[in-house]
Image (spheres, rainbow, N blue to C red):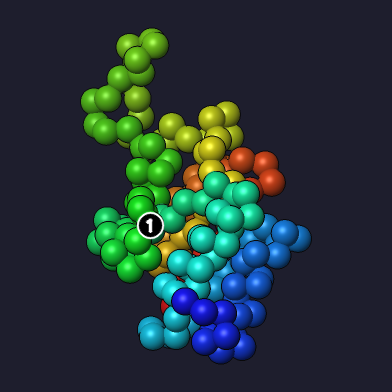
Amino acid sequence: MDWSSLDETQQNAISACLDKSKRFVAISGAAGTGKTTIMQLVYTKLHDAGYLPVLCAPTGKAARRITEATGFQALTIHKLLEFPHPHERDEATGKALNPTRPKRNRQSPLEFTAVLVDEAAMVNHELFADLSDAMSVGSKLCLFGD
């Protein structure tokens, strides 16, 4: 997609996501306003700028839709944060893992330096807190949604 084919609002949204001084950016708009296109361009430009970006969404259906629309693999937030499956055990200790607590957290942060979340309005405050806690120092969070 050519930058000149985007309207001013879309260009401003992309610029905000790429601004190194902004670590948290929220992009909202009604259906059909180009959020997915913006997400795809932001992902590419962040990658080209040296970030390690990841796309995620709160549901499997939303993650599949983003993967299909952008061509980049998207994960559910639960998969990204490595929530354990029921009855899963810690390999080192053999103790049962709590399926309500993610493996990725402040002590074991994500390796990604930019997290792009689709359908961000669907993320409850507990899952958002888990995601925030798992982000490495200095990483960027871009939220997209209606």
Badge 1 amino acid: Phe
Assign a secondary structure to mark 1: loop
Residue plotted at (47% across, 76% down): 1
Q: Position of residue 88 (x, y in %)?
A: 27, 25
Q: How many marks?
A: 1
Q: Position of residue 23 (x, y in %)?
A: 67, 57
Where on the picture, by quarter, is residue 48?
bottom right
Residue 88 is at least partly visible in this image: yes
Q: Residue furthest top?
A: 93
Where on the picture, by quarter, is residue 74?
bottom left
Q: Is residue 45 left or right of residue 81?
A: right
Residue 129 is at least partly visible in this image: no
Image quarter where the C terminus lies is: bottom left
Residue plotted at (35% across, 61% down): 71
Q: Is residue 113 left or right of residue 30?
A: right
Residue plotted at (35% across, 25% down): 97
Q: From what the image shows, is residue 6 above or below residue 113?
A: below
- Which residue is denoted by mark 1 in the rendering? 72
Residue plotted at (55% across, 54% down): 47
Q: Position of residue 6 (x, y in %)?
A: 53, 85
Mark 1 Cα shell of 10 Å, populated few (<14), some (14-19), many (≥20): some
Q: From what the image shows, is residue 71 above or below residue 103?
A: below
Q: From what the image shows, is residue 112 above or below residue 91?
A: below
Where on the picture, by quarter, is residue 31?
bottom left
